[in-house]
Image: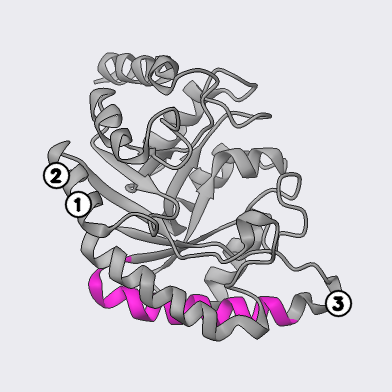
Amino acid sequence: MKLTANLSLMYTELPFLQRFAAAHHDGFGAVEIQFPYDTPIEQIQQALAENNLRCVLINVPAGDLMEGGEGLAAVPGKTAEYAAAMVECLYYARALKVSCVNVLPGRCNDENKRVFYLDTFKKNLLKTAESLAPFGITTTFEAINTRDMPGFLISSGQQMLDIIAELNHPAIKAQFDIYHMALMGHNVCDFINLHAAKIGHIQFADIPKRGEPGSGTLDFPAIFRCIETSGYKGWVGAEYKPTRATSMTMQWKRDLAVNVALCS
């Protein structure tokens, strides 16, 4: 299994540029960053090179989404802002040589406008894929649970599958976040087994508090076995909020290494 550490949620006890060394020390060969745009590209490239890491995923800038707003990707009146965000994202994505760029659909605060938001999102998603695909970059989008983000436009695996089928673009895939989908009641192993070919990136955290595996109720040994046997070939991102200093929450990683050794 190809593991990556999300440096936006993990190692936050350290300044951002020191998190790369900490991830390397804990045995990760790759990282992902939600929004790298506050840090100059050259500094990120240096941190990656010094620690023998690659960056596999970033998000398109999402405007006011993280502050409770609707974001950019689906809002009909923000298409110009989204286009500008894509220009910035493409600059970072190419320089960092990422495998995937993730698009956050955002919220729709007026249910009567939902159809228009979905239409805008699908158009922006397709334009994003057409911009990134020539550089070998997969475009993903993710469903997020409506407990943490009420009004989120896409909150189920089936909605992701429907959009993938409608747009029918080979570079558009689902980002499947185990934490979000488990909170929405999905059987995550069933989804991964059935739809591995349509998943471009997997992320995980335990429920209900988004901590490291073992801090909640999910059966991660079974989930990891499922991922390994499903045919999924992409990266699997640890994207959790550590309950202690991040390096002290790696028992799941040690257990995974032992289980892989026993099965090999």
Determine whether 166 is above or below 50 in the image: below
Q: Is residue 97 visible?
A: no
Residue 153's disc number: none
Residue 242 location in percent, x, y? Answer: 51, 25
Query: Magenta stretch containing residue 133, yes or no?
Result: yes
Q: Amino acid at mark 1?
A: Gln
Q: Which residues are magenta?
A: 116-137
The residue indicated by pointer 1 is 45
**Is disc 3 surrounded by few (<14), some (14 to 19) or many (20+) residues within 10 Å?**
few
In which quadrant will I find the N terminus?
top left
> In what element is the residue under mark 3?
helix
Closest to the camera, between mark 2 and mark 3, is 2
Apparent side of residue 7 relative to residue 108 in the rendered image (left or right): left
Work out whether residue 154 or residue 39 is closer to the camera in this orientation and state it: 39
Q: Amino acid at mark 3?
A: Asn
Work out whether residue 139 or residue 151 is closer to the camera in this orientation and state it: 151
The residue indicated by pointer 2 is 49
Is label 1 in contact with label 2 (beta carbons under 8 Å)? Answer: yes
Q: Is residue 152 visible?
A: yes
Please name the residue shown 40% across and 18% down the image: 250
Residue 21 location in percent, x, y? Answer: 24, 31
Please name the residue shown 65% across and 38% down the image: 182
The residue indicated by pointer 3 is 112
Closest to the camera, between mark 1 and mark 3, is 1
Q: CA distance from mark 1 to mark 3?
A: 44 Å
Q: CA distance from mark 1 to mark 2?
A: 6 Å
> In what element is the residue under mark 2?
helix
Determine whether 112 is above or below 240 in the image: below
Please name the residue shown 32% across and 42% down the image: 31
